[in-house]
Image (spheres, helix red, strand yellow):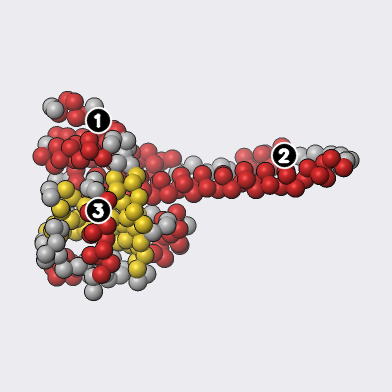
Amino acid sequence: MGCEQWRGKLDAYVDGELDLAEARVLAEHVRTCSACAADALGRVQMKRAVQVAGKRYTASTELRDRISKSLTPKPRRRVWHWQILAAPALVLLIISVATNFYMGREGARRQRVYSELADLHVAALASAAPVDVISTDRHTVKPWFQGKIPFTFNLPELQGSEFTLLGGRVTYFAQTPGAHLIYQVRKHEISVFIFQDRAFEDHGEAAASLPSGTEHALSFNMENWTQDGLRYFVVGDVGAGDIQALSKLLQDAR
């Protein structure tokens, strides 16, 4: 498939709308084609810019006051017996609607977390320099982060496994600095993001309440968990088994 045909799929790729098999093939093409890599990176940057711009507007005090004044209380009405009987059902209906609204909003917030992590993963792989420290040695990569992020972490010994550490870079999520590590397995890259867990709580991010475990979202398999006050995210276009295997190595690292 030529570049022209791939470019028609780049928007779907950065939005996570391709199926896993097609996303893998396109990711492989992006790694070998500088033109498509630059195009993909530009689309990711535009997507992030739109997300930031959408958060800049907040309703003014005057607008909120006008809305509040328009919500005038309704006159009291006589309560008949059938209304008293219907009250419990009405309460249940309100609770149900409120619960569905809350779950929908939480689902949207979680989707935003996954989307931003997927963007960071795609942007790094599309970049000409995906890592700032290049090394397969964990004893080189781990010390490089000292003084650049406000925490330390352990990396696993990969000897005997299928995984290779390519290197790492400093990244940011919700203005929180963290470590972005890139591993490789059978020519596929996997991103590992590490942040302080309390930073998400301070910012009220949905990531603070994400259930631990493996999920498939936005054409990627992802796993997240908390350990020793840190929040880990593993993201890649590989199978769930590879995500779980690398996650287990990281969880057992000492």
Hey, what amino acid is under mark 1? Lys
Question: Pointer 3 and pointer 2: residues touching (CB < 8 Å)?
Answer: no
Other-residue count near label 1 (Cα within 10 Å), few / some / many at <14 / 14–19 / ≥20: some
Question: Which of the image's four quarters has the N terminus?
Answer: top left
Q: Which residue is mark 1?
A: 9
The residue nearer to you, when weighing 12 against 66, is 12
Tell me the distance, in whole angstroms, between the alpha carbons under discs 3 and 2: 54 Å
169 displayed left or right of 202: left
Up-down relation of residue 85 to residue 198 (above or below): above
Q: Which residue is mark 2?
A: 71
Q: Residue at x 45, y 62 (%)?
A: 202
Element assignment for label 3: helix
> Most extreme residue toward the top, as rendered?
4
x and y percent of residue 244 in the render? 27, 57
First of labels 2, 1 by sequence position:
1
Q: Is residue 176 visible?
A: no
Hey, what amino acid is under mark 2? Leu
Say which mark, if any, is on residue 241. 3
Up-down relation of residue 144 to residue 235 (above or below): below
First of labels 3, 2 by sequence position:
2
Other-residue count near label 2 (Cα within 10 Å), few / some / many at <14 / 14–19 / ≥20: few
First of labels 3, 1 by sequence position:
1
x and y percent of residue 215 in the render? 35, 50
Q: Residue at x 23, y 65 (%)?
A: 249
Q: Nearer the viewer, mark 3 or mark 2?
A: 3
